[in-house]
Amino acid sequence: MTQPSPPPAPVPAFASRDPLDPAFWDERFDQGYTPWDRGGVPERLRQFATELHGLPTVLIPGCGSAYELAFLSEAGWDATAIDFSPAAVAAARQAVGPQWQGRVVEADFFQYRPSAPLDLIYERAFLCALPRAMWPPVAARWAELLPPGALLAGYFFFDNNPKGPPFGIAREALDALLAPHFRCVADEAVLDSMPVFAGKERWMAWRRL
Ligand SMILES: C[S@@+](CC[C@H](N)C(=O)[O-])C[C@H]1O[C@@H](n2cnc3c(N)ncnc32)[C@H](O)[C@@H]1O
């Protein structure tokens, strides 16, 4: 007989309520309340790394613990992970270890300038971390950072929940957001989601027009 799953851990009381403030994320990392944190590299990204030719230059915005950074760097990719929360950066440096911690940069996505042209931006739980009003500036910055032919690839969270983070998007809204700059080239179900995203996230790749 299967045992009933334990009730979810209670949400700690947090002082910061604004996900646009790095302190919001600092507090959650400091208190170990990170339900989005996968503790490793998602399966579809592992597969994607074998599919892509060459050794792309990739940016991981809002990287959190940045497990993907070590994985992609070990695959030979020129990868950089950024986050504006000092606590997230500390968690990432710890997770990736001494070899790759210089590739974790404390920076705001909207200000950061890559030192080399990007082939790819990897998305996971960054768009959905930001209130919906921020989505047009995020899409505009993705488009600004990626030259024609480059890819925006990763995980997108679909939901119509009024409160977040995570803030889910509707498929039509994502299409409308990205269609001026990108063409969708992959759209697949995800089988290894964290509970907070389960059944509501898809692996997608969008090519810059
Ligand atoms: C929900 S977490 C996701 C972390 C990671 N991508 C993952 O999949 O585990 C969102 C992250 O985005 C970061 N973030 C939010 N706004 C940012 C900004 N403007 N610039 C850089 N990082 C930002 C937060 O500090 C937080 O670490």
Image (tube, grey):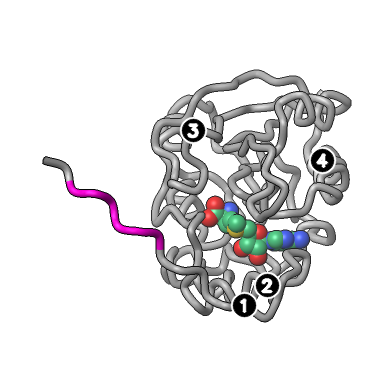
**Image coordinates for residue 69, horizontal then vertical, percent:** 51, 54
Q: Which residues are magenta?
A: 3-8
CA separation in Å, label 4 and label 2: 22 Å
**Image coordinates for residue 175, horizontal then vertical, percent:** 78, 25
Report the mark closest to the observer, 2 or 1: 1
Q: Which residue is mark 3?
A: 199
Mark 2 and mark 1 residues within 8 Å of each other at the beta carbon: yes
Placement of 117 over or under 176, stated as above or below: below
* SS at badge 2: helix
The quarter holding residue 207 reads top right
Foreground of the two, 159 or 56: 159
Q: Tell me the residue at 55%/30% (across/down).
A: 203
Report the mark closest to the observer, 1 or 4: 1
Q: Which mark is residue 139?
A: 4
Counting every numbered tag in the picture gives: 4
Disc 1 residue type (three-letter): Phe
